[in-house]
Image (tube, helix red, strand yellow):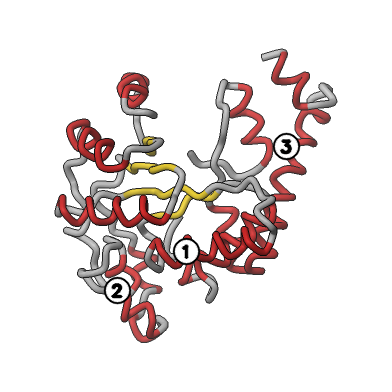
Amino acid sequence: MGTLGAYHSGAEPELIRGAVRKGIHAVISTASSMHPEPIWQSYEEEMRILGGKSPSQMFYQFYRPVERQRAIDLIQAVKKCGYKGLWITVDAPALGKRTAVRALSAEEALAVWMQEEGTTEAPNSFMPAMAGGDSLGQLSPNMSWVDLEWVKKEWKGPIVLKGIQTAQDAKIAFQFGDGGLRNGSDVLKALCLGATAVGVERPFLYALAAFGSQGVERCVDAVAGSYVLGPVVARYGHATRLLNDM
């Protein structure tokens, strides 16, 4: 989930503060409204405030730029920061023509800092879109299993593939180290189907836009609340009993 600076002035660091306080992990996108370094610094700062007691970990969602060296430089920057793992997006060779979004992206309405960051020289391949420009040509349209070989070599850490389409892809992805949930009942369904972890995206965007980091915290509570309520409504009483019965 990227370009959070378009929804809240605190951008990605504001989201991170709420996530760390609630003890959940966060995945920062290449499509973020700022570089990975200041986002990581906000994570470290919040962890210091909490005395390191939060279990939160930071991950990075990677969209491969067209130029391989540029992609390697971004991977190295993320690794240097200390992000726990790399989530590689494989189902977005280009951004779709989102007419409604384009109608709302009048350049004069964007903050000055967005326009300054929106250069093709920035390591973030989505930065031009933040300035009301076109990111076409900034993303590699030919991401393949061969790419994963050199990405894995450069990264040397945990990898998750985001956007695979078939069971066969999942089997191949497993050799390389290897969502869209809206509420707690979705989380419960995923766990019943065999998932061991889930990611929630859009609800946090809305919560951040409305109430900042406090909204993010409240969103965690809302998702957790509906997760707990689901088994009760299904007459199981507790999630553990429901999961054991699957």
Q: Earlier in the sequence, mark 2 or mark 3?
A: 2
The residue indicated by pointer 3 is: 227
**Residue at image x 14%, y 54%?**
67
Residue 37, picture quadrant: bottom left
What's under tag 2, amino acid-wise? Gly
The Cα atoms of the two marked residues, 2 and 3, are separated by 39 Å
Category of crowding for the residue at label 3, using alpha-carbon neighbours closer than 10 angstroms: few (below 14), some (14–19), many (at least 20): many
Residue nearest the observer in this picture, 23 or 211: 23
Category of crowding for the residue at label 1, using alpha-carbon neighbours closer than 10 angstroms: few (below 14), some (14–19), many (at least 20): many
**Residue at image x 22%, y 52%?**
71
Question: Which SS class for mark 2?
Answer: loop
**Quarter of the image containing the N terminus?**
bottom left
**Residue at image x 57%, y 27%?**
196
The residue indicated by pointer 1 is: 39
Foreground mark, 1 or 3, reads 1
The Cα atoms of the two marked residues, 1 and 2, are separated by 17 Å
Would you say the residues marked 1 and 3 are in contact, meaning their CB atoms lie under 8 Å apart?
no
**Quarter of the image containing the C terminus?**
top right
Residue nearest the observer in this picture, 174 or 156: 156
Residue extending furthest top? 245
The residue indicated by pointer 2 is: 118
Question: Which SS class for mark 1?
Answer: helix
Residue nearest the observer in this picture, 76 or 13: 76
Q: Which mark is residue 220?
A: none
Q: Earlier in the sequence, mark 1 or mark 2?
A: 1
Residue 212, picture quadrant: bottom right
| Residue 187 spot, x, y in % from top left | 63, 35
Would you say the residues marked 2 and 3 are in contact, meaning their CB atoms lie under 8 Å apart?
no
